[in-house]
Image (cartoon, grey):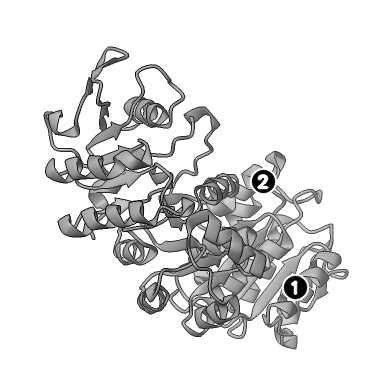
Amino acid sequence: MDFRTMFEPKTMAIIGVSLHNDRHPANVIYNKNRFRYPVKVYAVNPQGGEYYKEKVYKNIGDIPEKIDLAIIAVRAEHVPGVLEECVESWVGGVVVISGGFSETGRHDMRDELIRVANEADFPIIGPNCLGIYSPSHVDSFFLPSERMVRPGQGNVAIVSQSGGILVDQMVKYAEQGIGLSRAVSIGNKAVVTELDLLKYLARDDQTDVIAFYMEGFGEGQGREFVNAASRSPKPVIVMKAGKSEAGSRAVSSHTASIAGDYRVFSSIMKQHGIVEAYDEYEMLNFSEALSCYSKPIKGRVGIVTASGGHGVVAVDRCNKSDLEVPLLPDDRQEIIREKLSNSIKTIASIDNPIDLTGSAQDDDFVVAARQLSLIDDIDCVLILLLPYIPEVTSDVGARLSQLYQETKKPIVAYVPHVEKYMMIIEGFQLNNVPVADSIEGAIMMVEAMKRCGQC
């Protein structure tokens, strides 16, 4: 399936707009797209009439131009009939927001929806979902604009069975400065599945990393998904819910999916080089790292810090993740020490981690990181930056990230994410170097590059 028409529609119909209730989901979607996105939006309600002086059409077939994307927000029992009308009107694709299908035991309603789609080869996202958020193009989420936190344009696509998890993750992505190419809530995924979107996003020129939150597969779908993900030319990240027996029961009542055996699932992900994120925090950090770096690493880390404690914590965490922290050759240690500023030359610990102490300056971080970047046995440099030490300036992030441009050896940074340090963080991120908000997050970023078979 080609979803570009749905992700970048020129025309859009919202079916189910209320003439009296501005808080109705259909009205929220209508108003936000009409006023905030470059798409021509039409309202549809069987009663017809006007909504804020705009014509409301009784049927999608009455709209005087072809519709690229229709959003259906009517009662479940009316959905099949509305879908038939969309097919007859040559609509490009549909998002069914409405719930009341398999998740409530109405499998017959789901089957009817599938029948309409299959007979017409018609793409339907949902039901029981939020639909599509495509930055600068369209937003079918029925959440008021003033309450939404949206990441900027970027190269990470997220596909989620849960609308709530998706929106929550979008808030975290925005907070961490990770941009999105597409975000798709697929709900019960009666017709369009993860596999369909994986195949499309793997060739989507706006997307470099594909992340999934999934609860379970239909019969036979899991094997096909794994095979497609292992062949994807782009990194694929999967966060799976329903790991426990109780979680599996919750999955069944949420989206009527079968969670399956989690240990088997996790083992297969690993065998095929698909990056499994255990939780939302891993998914966040994996996404940022893989959106910046496109080559896999072996996992040999060189660490630069201004605090011995931070270095020790980082080494322990590396060890837990099977990342190596190799000792530095004596001659390289001598070179580093010789190039450091006089104030720390005799007190810095030049091993791995390199502890520059709290008297370090920007130049010292640059010297240490450059020398680590030149060592063949190190394939990633981890900078644990403490922005409150006296001699570090707000330029240090931009200066360190230039090293990546020179050497092409990946750099990952840790900087506390508070407003006071944003200039340093932006210095890294504007130069495409990922910055974690914790030491653990930074190690996760390194781990993602090691675990990704498709980087």
Helix, strand or loop for disc 1: helix
Dot 1 alpha-carbon crowd within 10 angstroms: few under 14, some 14 to 19, many 20 or more = some
Q: Amino acid at mark 1?
A: Arg
Question: What is the number of the mark on residue 317?
Answer: 1
Q: Which residue is mark 2?
A: 394
Residue at the top extreme of this rendering: 53
Q: Is residue 134 left or right of residue 282?
A: left
Which percent across, then down, holds residue 428? 58, 54
Q: Amino acid at mark 2?
A: Ser
- Vertically, is 179 above or below 13? below
Q: Is residue 50 left or right of residue 384?
A: left
Helix, strand or loop for disc 2: loop
Image quadrant assignment for residue 201:
bottom left
Image quadrant assignment for residue 16:
top left
Q: Quadrant of the C terminus?
A: bottom left
Q: Residue at x 40, y 62 (%)?
A: 208
Q: Residue at x 50, y 76 (%)?
A: 452
Mark 1 vs 2, N-terminal side? 1
Which percent across, then down, holds residue 119? 17, 58
- Vertically, is 65 above or below 388? above
Foreground: 146 or 311? 146
Q: Is residue 88 visible?
A: yes
